[in-house]
Amino acid sequence: MTDQPETLDPQRQQQAKEYARIGRRIFVAELAIGTAYVLFWVFSGLSPWLRNQIYPFTESVWLAVPLFALGFGLPYTVLTAPLSYYSGFVLPHRYGQSTQSLADWLKDQAKGMALSGVLGLIILLVIYGLLTTAPGSWWLWAALVMLVFSVLLSNLAPVLIFPLFYKYKPLDDDELVVRLTRLAERAGAQVRGVYAFDMSSKTVAANAALMGLGSTRRIVLGDTLLTNFSHDEIETVLAHELGHHVHRDLPLGILVQSGLTLVGFWLADAVMRWGVSAFGYNGLADPATLPLLLVALALFGLVTMPLGNAWSRWREVLADRYALETTGKTQAFINAMTRLANQNLADAEPPAWVEFLLHSHPSISKRVALAQKFPAPKLG
């Protein structure tokens, strides 16, 4: 491959816009179903009814909360299963984005639900343990626990979670390994190797990442990226990821999210206290308050999503600038962005309101425009 200009595929862009529109409709449908489901539990009296079915067997928070969570979560999983199947399997296959068989997709879904179930249960037990022992300040301690949890998860994900879904091995392209390792050294990132993973086992989309913290930090490249992108293009993609390292976006992002989490828990505390008074729950640690906790956090997350996305887009622009400054390969960057739009079926120019509300990255058209206006590298 050369650095000849890559152009957007008009047919792919038409498909990308259709794909994005359907995705937004699914998002709204999921939001409506989830909201109606939780509110039904809150106002129908189903929450105290389920709690009353559990208490004859156990009133221990360590057992009652998991049993309530199971009774609350299982019907929702069944209710939304058809929509999940359509959005996660049918639609990607219809638009040629998925390479998974139904059996493999179901295996991934099972692993994902098991993992999220275990992690979610740990978080719930911590929260309800704090509601029991520190009802006046539980929201503060819970936010601190979530901060620690986020750091641990970022550190352990490459070695414990990622291998559950992908197989990866050291990259066998020595020349590219040297180039990317030197790029990481220039950014001050101490990586523990460059790896390729079998992204093609699930999708035709391409991606790369700088994963982990400390001893688990590594460069990972999807085989779909390695197959379809030139070395210069891959270098600019990784330089963007290293820009996040240089600008400390991971720790800053964790801190920003922790601040939002703190406010979210504080608001959830107010909503749960109102619920205890309005619905006669047996205190904040009553398992029946779980739907109130979830609806408060979900609504807060929905309201603050544009703010979080605006923060993310700002940091993405800074990372793009770093990639352009560091590599000096403007055309390769433009080619990489354009090729990603074609290959990942990304809408290169979404409606402004969609980008503002829903997108964590600037549109491809804006990223290409940034590169086109970027000063040419100085020679000599």
Image: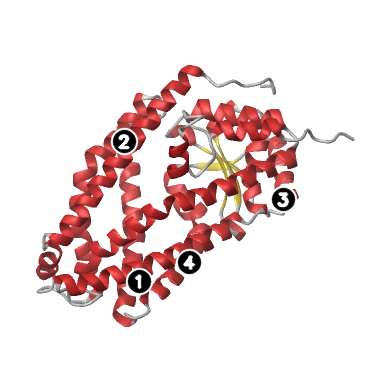
- Most extreme residue toward the top is 11
Q: Mark 3 vs mark 4: which is more N-terminal? A: 4
Cβ–Cβ below 8 Å for labels 3 and 2? Answer: no
User: For this rendering, which residue is in front, 339 or 300?
Assistant: 300
- Most extreme residue toward the right is 380
Comparing labels 4 and 2, the label whose residue is closer to the camera: 2
Q: Residue 50: where, in percent of width, then height? A: 12, 64
Cβ–Cβ below 8 Å for labels 2 and 1? Answer: no
User: Which residue carries the number 1 mark?
Assistant: 126
Q: Mark 1 vs mark 3: which is more N-terminal? A: 1
Estimate how packed mark 3 is, as few (under 14), some (14 to 19) or many (20 or more) residues with alpha carbons within 10 Å.
some
- How many marks can you see? 4
The amino acid beneath tag 1 is: Val
Q: Secondary structure at mark 2?
A: helix
User: Which residue carries the number 3 mark?
Assistant: 187
- The residue located at (46%, 55%) in the rendering is 160
Residue 44 sits in which quadrant?
Answer: bottom left
Q: Secondary structure at mark 3?
A: loop
Q: Residue 233: where, in percent of width, then height? A: 65, 31
Q: Mark 4 vs mark 1: which is more N-terminal? A: 1
User: Which residue carries the number 2 mark?
Assistant: 25
User: Which residue carries the number 4 mark?
Assistant: 147
